[in-house]
Amino acid sequence: MSIAVDTSVLVAIAKGESEASDWIELLIDAQTEDELILCDVVAAEFFALLLDEEKFRDTLNRLGIVFRETSLESAQFAGRIFREYRRHGGPREHLIPDFLIAAYAEKQARGIAAIDRGYLRRYFPGLKILKPD
């Protein structure tokens, strides 16, 4: 199976944040059983941070992360959850890309490596979230 990698993890690693080495260790451990994948939205967000194709590709290669496009099923799932979120008064704090990333992880992987500030657990309660201990 696969583990999706969120932009938040790639940003923490690229910026050398305090938990960067913990994230790298988690990803290395995850690779023993799973393929690490990222979707179109994460690829675009991470590339926007770097704006350097060589560094972008090198980072993904070093971490063993491969690109897998978002399926139509995942996109539809994201749309349904986003609509419910807005219908119940959800503010524009989260936009459709956030929902696409989470839906991708839930439908096309067995979990996501992500920094979660409660949003994933709240709107995607069935999604397994991997984080350093």
Image (cartoon, rainbow, N blue to C red):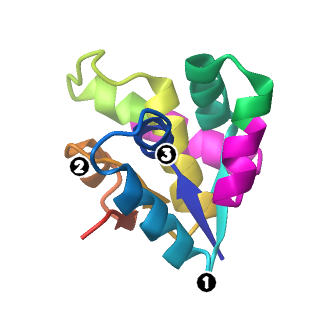
Taken as a whole, is the magenta stretch helix, strand or loop? helix
Amino acid type, callout 2: Arg
What SS does tag 1 mark? loop
Amino acid type, callout 3: Asp
Question: Which of the numbered marks, if any, corresponds to residue 122?
Answer: 2
Q: Which residue is mark 3?
A: 6
Looking at the image, is 2 positioned above or below residue 12? below
Q: Which residue is located at x 54 percent, y 52 percent?
A: 5
Where residue 68 appears, as percent x and y from the top left, is 76, 50
Looking at the image, is 117 positioned above or below residue 48? below
Looking at the image, is 79 positioned above or below residue 119? above
What SS does tag 3 mark? loop
Q: Which residue is mark 1?
A: 32
Q: Nearer the viewer, residue 70 or 79?
A: 70
Amino acid type, callout 1: Thr
Q: From which residue to which does the magenta span run?
A: 57-81
Label 2 vs 3, first from the N-terminus: 3
